[in-house]
Image (cartoon, rainbow, N blue to C red):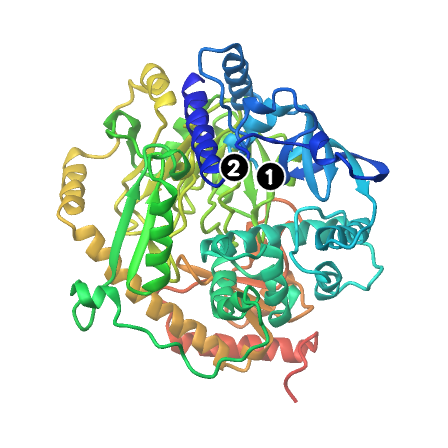
Amino acid sequence: MLEDYKNALKSGQRAYRACVARGQSPYLAVLDDILNGVNIVAQEPLGLVDIPAESIVGTKTSGRHTAFAANFMPLLEEDTEFAIKWSNLCEAHLEEGIHTPIIAYEFLNKFYVQEGNKRVSVLKYFDAVRIAGTVTRLVPERNETLENKIYYEFLDFYKLSKINNVQFSRLGGYAKLQTLVCKAASEVWSDDDRLNFSALYTMFSQQFYALGGSALELTPGDALLVYLSVYRYSDACQSTPSQVRENLAKLWDEIKILTEPHAVTLSLEPNSASEPLLSKLNIFSQKPSQLKVVFLHEHNAENSAWVRAHDKGIEALQQAFPDRVFITRKENIEPEVDAEQIIIGAGTEQLYSMLVQLLGRDRLYGVEDPGYSKAARIYALGGARTAPVLVDEGGVSLRSLEMSGAQILHTSPNHQFPTGAVTPSWFSTNFAVEASTPSAPVTLAANASSAADDYDSEFRFTLRPIPTLQSIDRAGRVIYVNTFSRTLAPSLRISYMVLPKSLTERYRAQLGFYSSTVPAMEQYTLARFLDEGYFEAHINRMRKSYRAQRDAVIDTILQSPLGEHCRVSGEDAGLHFLLTIDTKCTDHVLRADAEGRGVRLSFLSDFALRPGSAPQHTLVIHYPGIDLGRLRSALSILEALLYFRDWKYKGRK
C-alpha cells in the first residue's frame, strides 16, 4: 500500500503549500492550544458517535500534529516508520475495514482526535463520510460571540435530534430546521427521523456543492433552510437527486442573496453585462451546439497536478456558460487500457455465474431488496449464500448492508431497478460489482474487487450522467458489468465486465480456460460499430425517442382522471418509472380486480425479496412501446376500480 501513501503524501504536501500561501498554519489544529484561556463549564461523555469526517479538524494534544497537514493527510517521508504503519493500516482497512473507534473531543461542534490520528487519515484518504468514535463534549462558557451563540442553539437541537452533521452560519437555523421538518419545538426525533433526514441532507449537500456551493460563504444547512421553505420536507425526502438539483438550481439566486451584506435589497433590473467571452472568440455559431470538455485524471482530481487556480477557472466557465459548456472529470483513468481486464459473455447471467466462481462460493452475497431477483437466484444456484439489502429513496441502505453481514453487494447504484433510486457517490464498501442493466446490477464485497456501472445510464434525460462506482474507485475493487441488449437489441447477446487489475491474474489462472460464448464475427461487427461512431449516434437518437415516449405516457397519466391521485417518480433516467397511487387498496386486491377486467399490473412489491420491503400501491411502468389508446382505457378501468372500492380515493363525485 506504499503507492497509496505516496498519493496521500502528495495531497498533504499540496494542502501544506496552500495553507502557507494563505498565511495559515499548515498543520492540524491542536485543541489544547485552542482551549488556552477558554473556560470549560462542562464535560459530557457522549459515548460512541458517528462523527462526520469533515468535522474532524485536529488533534487533542500537540504530539505528532506536525506529521499531518491540515487535511489530515501525512507529511512524513515514505521511508519512515510512520509511513510503514500508515500503509499497514491502509491495507488492513481494505481487507477487513477499520472497526476500532477513535477517541475524540468535541468543541464547538468540531472534533479533535486524542487517539487514532492515523485511522482518521486513512479513512479520510478513502473519502469516509462518517468515522466511529468515543466522544467527550467540552462545553464552553456562554459569551456574546456569534460562534458561541450558534453552538448553544446546536446543543438544544442535538438533545432532541442527535443530529451532528448539519451546521448553520446564522442564528435561528436549528430552531427553523426543527419546524421545517414538521417537529414541535420540544419534540424528540425517532431513529427513522434521523435516517430520513441524514439521507436527505447527504443528497442535498452533494447537489449544493455540485452547483458551486463551495464558492459561497454558506453552509449546506443554510441553503437547506431556503429549500425547505419552498418545498415540503416530505416531498424533499421522496425526491431523487436530479429533482433536488433541478429545484435547487431554481432557488440559486435566492440562496446567493444570503451572502450579500443587504440581503433584503430587491433588484428589479438585471445587471448590465458585456458581450460573452465565447461570442468574442467566435467559438459558437448563432445556434451553438454544446461544447463538452473532459479532464482525465490518472488518480483523482485532488491528487492531480491541477492547481487551485485551474479549478477556479473551471468553476467560472461553468457558471458563465451553464447551457453551452459542459465540463466533466473522469478519475482513475489508466494510462493504458489492458484488454485482459475485459471479459466478454453471452448475457450478464453467464458473467454473474463466473463471478461466483471467481470471488468464491463461501462469501455472503448481498442483493438489493427490492431488486432484480434473478441475481439472487444465479448466486444461489452457484452455491453462494445471499442476503437481502434494503434499498430506499437514498439508494442502498448502509445500515441494512452492515446488518446483513454481506461481503459482496450486487447493486445498480445510478438508477436502481426497480426503484430508480440513486446511491450517492460517497457510498463505499469493501468490494463491489456494479451492472448497467437490471440483468447486470452491481456487487460490493469484502476482501475482493468491485464492479460498477449503471444499468441504463445511456438513457439519462436530465442533467449530466452520474459517475459509476468504478470511475471513482481508488482501491481497484469495483467490477464493471454492462450489456448491449438494452441499448441495441435484446437478441444481441453481448455483455461484458471490466475487472480491476488486481483480479485479472486470478481470473486467467482460475477461469482462463473458458472459451468465449460470443461469436467473433459479432464482436468484430460491434467493435466497428463503436469505432466509427454509429453507437453514439444511435444512443442520441434513441434517447430523444425514449424521452418523447416517456413524456407522452406521463402526460396521458396525469391528464387522466387518475392524474390527481397519483405521483410519478424515477422518471429522470432509464426505460421505466414508478407510479404511486393514493389508495388503501392492497396490491393483491388491486391486481385481482384489474386482471379480471383485462389489465395486467406490475407492482414494486413484486420485486421485494422480503414481505414489506417495498411500499404498496406503486406501479412499475415500462413505457417503451405503450399504446396510448390502450393506456387511456387501462387508466379509466383502474380509476373506476378505485372509485367503486371507495378507499382513500375521494376526488371523484
Answer with left or right where residue 273 lies relative to residue 523.
right
Callout 1–callout 2 Cβ contact below 8 Å: yes
Q: Which mark is residue 376?
A: 2
Q: Is residue 580 above or below residue 27?
A: below
Coordinates of residue 298 in the picture (x, y in percent): 32, 33
**Mark closer to the chain start, 1 or 2:** 2
Which of label 1 and label 2 is nearer to you?
1
- The residue located at (60%, 63%) in the rendering is 236
Res 42 → quadrant: top right
What element does badge 1 sit on? Answer: strand
The quarter holding residue 4 reads: top left
Query: How dense is the environment of label 2, judged by Cα within 10 Å: few (below 14), some, or many (20 and up)?
Result: many
Give the percent coordinates (x, y) of residue 381: 49, 30
User: Residue 465 vs residue 598: left or right?
Assistant: left
* Amino acid carrying mark 2 in the image: Ala
Left or right of residue 195, residue 76 in this image: left
Q: Quadrant of residue 441?
A: top left
**Badge 1: residue crowd in 10 Å (few <14, some 14–19, many ≥20):** many
> Amino acid type of disc 1?
Pro
Q: Which one is nearer the viewer's eye here, 178 or 31?
A: 31
Quadrant location of the C terminus in the rendered image: bottom right
Q: Is residue 223 above or below residue 484?
A: below
Residue with the mark numbered 1: 388
Residue 212 seen in the figure: yes
Which is nearer the eye, 5 or 374? 5
Q: Residue at 81% x, 53% y: name it.
A: 156
Q: Quadrant of the N terminus?
A: top left
| Disc on res. 260 | none
Residue 209 spot, x, y in % from top left = 49, 53
* Position of 121 relative to 600 (above/below): above
Q: Element type at marker 2?
A: helix
